[in-house]
Image: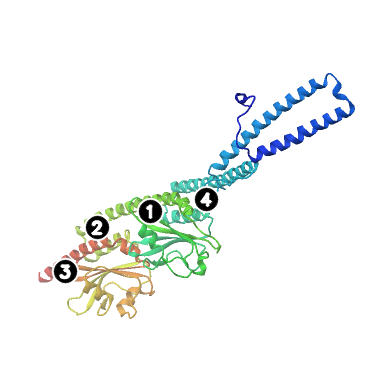
Amino acid sequence: MNWSSWPFPKRRPQTRLQRKLQLAFGLFFFLPVGGFVFFSQRYGILGDEYVPYFLLGFLVCAYIGYAILKNLFERIAALSDSIRLSPTPSAGADGTIPPDDELHVIAQSFQSIRSRFGQTVQQLEKKSAGISVLKDLSELCYVTFDAEEILYVMLERALLLANSDIGSVLTFDPSEPKTFRVKATIGLGEHVKAGDRIDFDSSIAKYAVINKSPLVVENIEADKRFGRSNLPHYGSKSFVCMPIKTSKTIIGVLTISSSDPQRRYTPEDSELLTPLLSNAAFTFENLRLLKENDRAAVCLRSVDRMVKLLNSSFRDGDLMHTVLHELHGVVPFEAAGILVKDETKAKTVLVKEWVSFTTSTVLKHSEHIYEGSIIEKALQQEACMTLDAAPEEPTPLDLALFTPRRTGSCCLIPLRTGGRMVGALVMVGSSSEAFREAQHLVSWIAGGLALAVDRNRLLGAVLKRT
């Protein structure tokens, strides 16, 4: 109790709670006192000499009790006013709670605090789950050297954090800058598979790359930016596209969705996934650089050995055979050979050397007409050419190069020396990606082989004259 206001507390505008206090005090004081006085008068008790002392003590105690209760109710009213005027989750448009019963205001405030506490607990649980996922991914980064596995695990953890079940990871194809390559998928079945190519310009994921920020779509059919219908295998009309960014560039895009048609994604979902993608992108970039470094070291050793071979005493078949085997350590081809133009016969090439690690119909020292074939196109273009499949109208030479199967890839590098084309280096394999990655190295080796072929031709001419 605040005794500084004793015995007459300062008057304030009466509140609803104070009016209830006065009514309760009246019921507990005036009616019992009035009844006591009435029965005392009726039965003559007031004549007793101790009755006045009793009444005086009763009034004093009643007053003190009333003052204490009044002070307590004023403090409750003040607390209610402070809560009502402060912004709360259940406040109105002006940030305050509409005036009501003080106890109701306090109860409503406690309910708001309870609701806020529940939301905070949920946010902490999400943060805890995110930290746990990041910890798992970080531990995996220390024990794996497979960049593809990192991307798949990143997709799994992203779906776990976002409470989703459909997702994919797209990366840029180094051989085709305007094309996405699917690296990992979950929940898309046969519609989208790892290894598929997706055109960059027609893909919605391009907006995440161009803007370098997450793309959150609540309803693709209602979004004016796209105006396209939702495909059934993507489930919900809402989805999130997250760019996978390294320190220098964007290497791909993560897309997540849900099979629940009512699911709606918000910017909070993208904020939750950002640390996960940053960690995975950093690890992926480190593994890629490590792989490139190892590959560069292997190429350097191979170049060193090939330079020594080209400057050695090896001649003709022995030299070319050894160089092709050394080249196989850098480029994983299935078959490779050196085809040289026959100067005595028009439109004819001679297979000077052929190395095959599978069944092949091309034989060493055999002759082939190259008119209309891919060999002629490579010689005319005077540039490296890589094919993903045999031509639609193949010549006998084309069929021989792609036998026993019509699928696969073929890489042709013209051999040029002294301003003229002397032949071509041919490599046949199952994938063109390895050929494109080693294109610069193979072109350099082809230049050395062209010099070796021309040197052997000159030595042969000299020997014939002598």
Estimate the spatial distance between the alpha carbons at disc 2 and disc 3, rounded to whole Å. 20 Å
Estimate the spatial distance between the alpha carbons at disc 2 and disc 4, rounded to whole Å. 79 Å
Say which label, 2 or 3, has the lower sequence index.
Answer: 2
List x then y, in percent, for residue 278.
41, 50
Does dot 2 land on a helix, a strand or a loop?
helix
Label 1 or label 2, whichever lies nearer to me, is 1
Say which label, 1 or 4, has the lower sequence index.
Answer: 4
The residue singled out by tag 3 in the image is: 457
Say which label, 2 or 4, has the lower sequence index.
Answer: 4
Label 2 or label 4, whichever lies nearer to me, is 4
Contact, mark 2 vs mark 4 (Cβ under 8 Å): no
List x then y, in percent, for residue 284.
40, 52
The residue closer to the viewer here, 82 or 369, is 82
Say which label, 1 or 3, has the lower sequence index.
Answer: 1
Contact, mark 2 vs mark 3 (Cβ under 8 Å): no
The residue singled out by tag 2 in the image is: 306
The residue closer to the viewer here, 348 or 421, is 421
Amino acid type of the residue that numbered disc 4 sits on in the rendered structure: Ala
The residue closer to the viewer here, 133 or 77, is 77
List x then y, in percent, for residue 91.
55, 47
Up/down of 17 relative to 355, above or below: above
Estimate the spatial distance between the alpha carbons at disc 1 and disc 3, rounded to whole Å. 53 Å
Amino acid type of the residue that numbered disc 3 sits on in the rendered structure: Arg
Estimate the spatial distance between the alpha carbons at disc 1 and disc 4, rounded to whole Å. 41 Å
The residue closer to the viewer here, 294 or 38, is 38
Mark 4 crowd level (few <14, some 14–19, many ≥20, 10 Å Cα): few
Residue drawn at x 52%, y 69% is 232
